[in-house]
Image: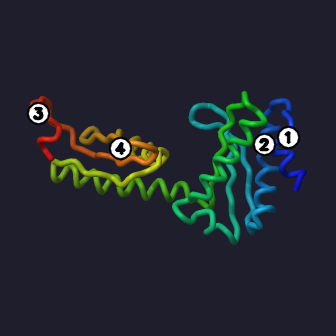
Amino acid sequence: MSGFFSKLFGGKKKEGSSDVEALVHTTVEGLLEKGGFELSFDLSSSTDDKGEPQLTVEFSGADEEILKDKEGQMIDSIQLFLKRVVQHHFPEDRTNVVIDCNGYREESSQALIDLADKLKGIALEKGKSVYFRALPPKDRKIIHQYLANDERVRSRSIGDGLFKKIKIYPVKSAGAESNHENSAE
């Protein structure tokens, strides 16, 4: 046990992408061992859309459903934990760590986009605002980015705290822009 945790919280090492990759590999192995998960993983290195280095851990195995349960909270937790471990050991490194389990992230994103598309249709059909349930920031970002591609609607986050609702509303015509937004509701 001390070997695993000493690697997590031990001294600093010199920075390098292979060192970061080795740290993530060792940490994931330790998590699977200590957690008693029946999972295997593939670790791949690439660059994200901003040109930053990215490590992707793809899980598979008998305990996949445990990771996917409750809207992927375990996947998100492992991802956050691994990011913090990398930040602790390599504070100057900008490697992004992404965790997935058998394509769960893509399925989840597509389900959000499908629901946003349905709500967008309702907003355009009725000419009124519609509201999306309270969501965490990463899910709101997916919806806002998707809706930004359609000039007929706008979206914005409503509320306080981490979880906020999304308001989807039709864009008013040029002559009606001076009217108050709530008059259509």
Q: SS at mark 1?
A: loop
- CA gap between label 3 and label 1 equals 61 Å
Q: Residue pushed farthest right?
A: 3
User: Between tags 3 and 1, which lies in front?
Assistant: 1
The residue labelled by disc 2 is 21
Of the numbered discs 3 and 1, the one sitting upstream in the chain is: 1
The residue under label 1 is 10
Please give left or right for residue 96 compared with residue 32 in the image.
left
Q: Is mark 3 on a helix, strand or loop?
A: loop
Q: Where is residue 165 in the image (x, y as percent from the top left)?
A: 35, 48
Residue 2 disc label: none
Residue type indicated by callout 2: Glu
Q: Earlier in the sequence, mark 2 or mark 3?
A: 2
Given this view, does label 3 or label 4 mark the residue nearer the observer?
A: 4
Q: What residue type is labelled 1?
A: Gly
Asked whether the residues under the numbered discs 3 and 1 touch, taking CB atoms below 8 Å apart as contact, a structural biologist would say no
Residue that label 4 marks: 159
Q: Residue at 62% across / 55% down in the picture?
A: 100
- Ranked by sequence position, the earlier of labels 1 and 2 is 1
Looking at the figure, which quarter contains the N terminus?
bottom right
Q: Residues within 10 Å of mark 4 (few under 14, many from 20)?
A: few
Quarter-of-image position of residue 183: top left
- Distance from disc 3 to disc 4, alpha carbons, whole Å, reads 23 Å
Count of numbered badges drawn on the protein: 4
- Which residue is at 39% across, 47% downward? 164
* Sequence-earlier tag: 4 or 1: 1
Choose between 47 and 3: the one closer to the eye: 3
